Image: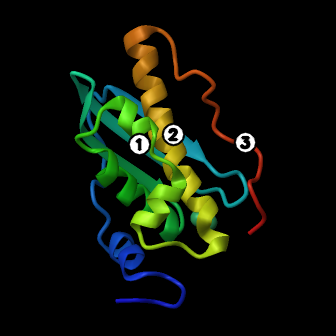
Amino acid sequence: MSMGPYSAKVMDHFMNPRNVGVIENPDGVGEVGNPVCGDIMKMFIKVKDNIITDVKFQTFGCGSAIATSSMATELIKGKTIEEALKLTNVAVAEALDGLPKIKMHCSVLAEEAVQAAIDDYLKKTTGKGLPGFKPHDEPLQEH
Ligand code: FES
């Protein structure tokens, strides 16, 4: 199914998001938000031997935020922490066959939610968070 500027994959992940929910006793949890639209994304991870064995998310936001968080969870599940940290918002959008330009900022939330969960995991396990990690608190662009 396709709808206007949205790819079939975006629609699929919006209508049937993967890995929605909460992980009890997560090894890491991160919450990020976009101050312009007010959308919020929360990501939970389970980590064993440096591998992300489980990941779930809750997104209170637009369809593109839901689709990108869903795709991001699929892309990092089973990956090492280092691999998950390399996931960019552009890669998430590409895996969804693209997003309309004015919706690219929504994919930034997905990238940041992954990093925030890993930041939390690293703080808990090593006492130190992700070097240089700071979710944006300035509007990325108008929408
Ligand atoms: S994340 Fe807010 S409009 Fe998409």
The three-letter amino acid code for the residue at tag 2 is Glu
The quadrant holding residue 25 is top left
Per the model, the C-alpha gap separating discs 2 and 3 is: 13 Å
The percent coordinates of residue 82 (x first, y second) are 39, 30
Is the Cβ of the residue at disc 1 closer than 8 Å to that at disc 2?
yes
Q: Earlier in the sequence, mark 2 or mark 3?
A: 2
Q: Residue at x 50, y 62 (%)?
A: 65
The reply to whether residue 3 is in sight is yes
Rendered image quadrant of residue 14: bottom left
At horizontal 49% and vertical 51% (from top left) the residue drawn is: 110
Query: Which label belongs to residue 137?
Result: 3
Residue for point 78% across, 65% down? 142
| Vertical placement of residue 21 versus 126, above or below | below
| Measured Cα–Cα span from mark 1 to mark 2 | 6 Å
Q: Which residue bears the numbered disc 2?
A: 31
Which structural element holds mark 3?
loop
Q: Quadrant of the C terminus?
A: bottom right
What is the C-alpha distance between the residues marked 1 and 3?
18 Å
Amino acid of disc 3: Asp
Residue identified by numbered label 1: 43
- Where is residue 26? Give x, y as percent: 30, 30
Q: Quadrant of residue 79?
A: top left
SS for callout 2 = strand
